[in-house]
Image: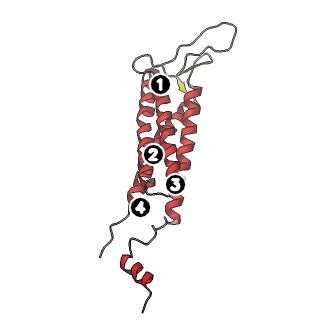
Amino acid sequence: MASLPLQARRLLGRQTRRQQRPSFLESWVRALVTLCSALTVVLSSVSVCDGRWVFLRGQRLLGLWPACPAGPGPLCVPGAGSAGPPPALLGSLAVAVAILGLALLMAAQVCGEARARGRWALGCGLVLSASVPSAAGLLVFAAPVLEARARFTLTFWCQVTASSLFLLNGLSGLYVHRLTRPRPATR
């Protein structure tokens, strides 16, 4: 005859079992999504802070922020995108939202509690939503500049890459969240 604690564990079975640990592949994919989101935030931050996105003829750089080129005369070049919301504001908003999402992704990775899945989903949603103001800032900036036949600089293409990576990281994180949803116990 089995002892009383052993019989109680058998009867209560599901309540006394520990939560299943995530598989190595799931942990690896979540770590990659978090790492890629962090690199995307850095890439977008550098691009928005530098802000010189267009190279005009005559060795002048035009960007998000009003800039004064180095030279003999203090000829200041105003920032582009004067029609509509300022692209620097949209880019900064995208970076701020992505940083908040990244913080939630990292908290979900570190904490193994029950609310970690909700943090992961919210963090991925914020990273995904950061792609909207980032892409809007790019469009507001690039629309008037395309008519001038100017050349875009590397920081502009960094922001294009960051905007698409915000979208891809958010979608892949939400997809992983959906795939790893706990299934209801069957009898």
Instruction: Work out whether mark 1 precedes mark 4 in sequence or the reverse, and give the earlier one.
Output: 1
In the rendered image, the quadrant that contains the C terminus is bottom left
User: Do the CB atoms of the residues marked 1 and 2 lie less than 8 Å apart?
Assistant: no
Label 4, label 3: how far apart the Cα atoms are? 17 Å
Regarding mark 4 in the picture, which secondary structure is present there? loop
Closer to us: mark 1 or mark 2?
2
CA neighbours of label 3 inside 10 A, class few (<14), some (14 to 19), many (20+): few
- Kindly state the secondary structure of the residue where label 1 is placed: helix
Closer to the camera: disc 4 or disc 3?
Answer: 3
Horizontal side of 79 relative to 139 (left or right) equals right
Residue type pointed to by label 1: Leu
Residue 180 bears which disc, if any?
4
Q: Percent position (x, y) of residue 50?
A: 59, 27
Q: CA distance from mark 1 to mark 2?
A: 21 Å
- Check disc 2 and give the amino acid type: Gly
Q: Which mark is residue 111?
A: 3
Residue on which the image places disc 1: 89
Residues at marks 2 and 4, CA–CA distance in whole angstroms:
16 Å
Upstream in the sequence, badge 1 or badge 2?
A: 1
> Whole-percent x and y of residue 161?
51, 39
Residue matched to label 2? 123
